[in-house]
Amino acid sequence: MAQFIKLYNDNPNPKEIAKIVKVLQNGGLIIYPTDTVYGLGCDITNTKALEKIAKIKGVKLEKSNFSFICNNLSHLSDYVKQIDSSTFKILKRALPGPYTFILPGSTSLPKAFKKRKTIGIRIPDNIIAQTIVEALGNPIVSTSIHDEDEVIEYTTDPELIFEKWQNIVDIVIDGGYGDNYASTVIDLTTDSPEVIREGKGSLDIL
């Protein structure tokens, strides 16, 4: 059964963060808060954990649309091909924030993503998510957890999330109520930015 860990966004407990990082390093799955909806994630370098998430989502890993949660833009050069200054300016304006940017993948992507031409990058405006990534030393993969309820697309209450996911994941982090709007997804790999999904973020950043 999963651990249920309460964290505060303004000051996450370092001991609890260390516990979460250890679980991720051992191939565990976590559910964690972002600045939009709660996400299901694991260490991007752990192929077995990635395969578990793909199975939960009912997709093949090589066809999955998982995004990378980073804690700042310095991770970009590790996973993204060189981008022009106008693209970088959009990223600087928007991040951290409720956006997922599709960018050209580099040749140094982790094993499971080697064949990817593009990847989604997220830097949520959420201290808990950023602190976990910083302590882990590399991004975590992220995918939203949908609700079966046709009216509510995403579950916002951490206790209800725990009730549903306690036998599927290793840790559920309670970071307060989540949002019910996913991130805005913007493709920056074409000549002009293309909005793939309009979510929580404003389009004024483009």
Image (spheres, rainbow, N blue to C red):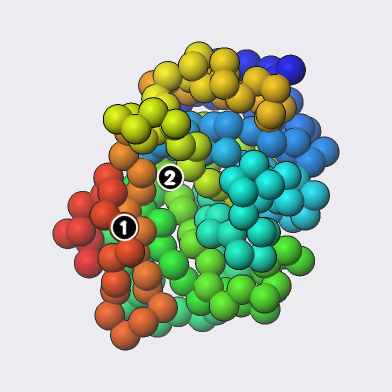
Q: Secondary structure at mark 1?
A: strand
Q: Amino acid at mark 1?
A: Arg
Q: Quadrant of the N terminus?
A: top right
The spot of residue 140 in percent (x, y) is 62, 48
**Which residue is at 57% across, 78% downward?**
117
Vertical side of 175 occupied by 137: above or below:
below
Picture coordinates of residue 84, whole percent (x, y) = 40, 82
Residue drawn at 53 percent across, 59 percent down: 65
Which label number is shown at residue 197?
1
Badge 2 density bin: few <14, some 14–19, many ≥20, Cα 10 Å: many
Answer above or below: position of 55 versus 75: above
| x 31%, y 39%: residue | 181
Judge from the rendering whether residue 175 lies leftward or rightward of residue 167; answer left or right: left
Considering depth in this image, is 182 or 61 the residue closer to the camera?
61
Q: Quadrant of the C terminus?
A: bottom left
Q: Position of residue 3 (x, y in %)?
A: 69, 18
Q: Is residue 199 above or below residue 159?
A: below
To which residue does mark 2 refer? Answer: 124
Q: Residue furthest left?
A: 204
On screen, residue 39 versus residue 13, left or right, reads left
Q: Residue at x 26, y 54 (%)?
A: 198
Is residue 41 among the parts visible in the rendering?
Answer: yes
Q: Nearer the viewer, mark 1 or mark 2?
A: 1
Q: Is residue 163 left or right of residue 206?
A: right
In the current view of this chain or complex, which residue is farthest to the bottom?
Answer: 191
Which numbered marker is on residue 186? Answer: none
x then y, percent, for residue 53: 66, 45
Q: Quadrant of residue 162?
A: top right
Whether residue 133 is visible here, answered yes or no, is no
Q: Quadrant of residue 179?
A: top left
**Label whose residue precedes the other's in the sequence (1 or 2):** 2
| Callout 1 crowding tier (Cα within 10 Å): few <14, some 14–19, many ≥20 | some
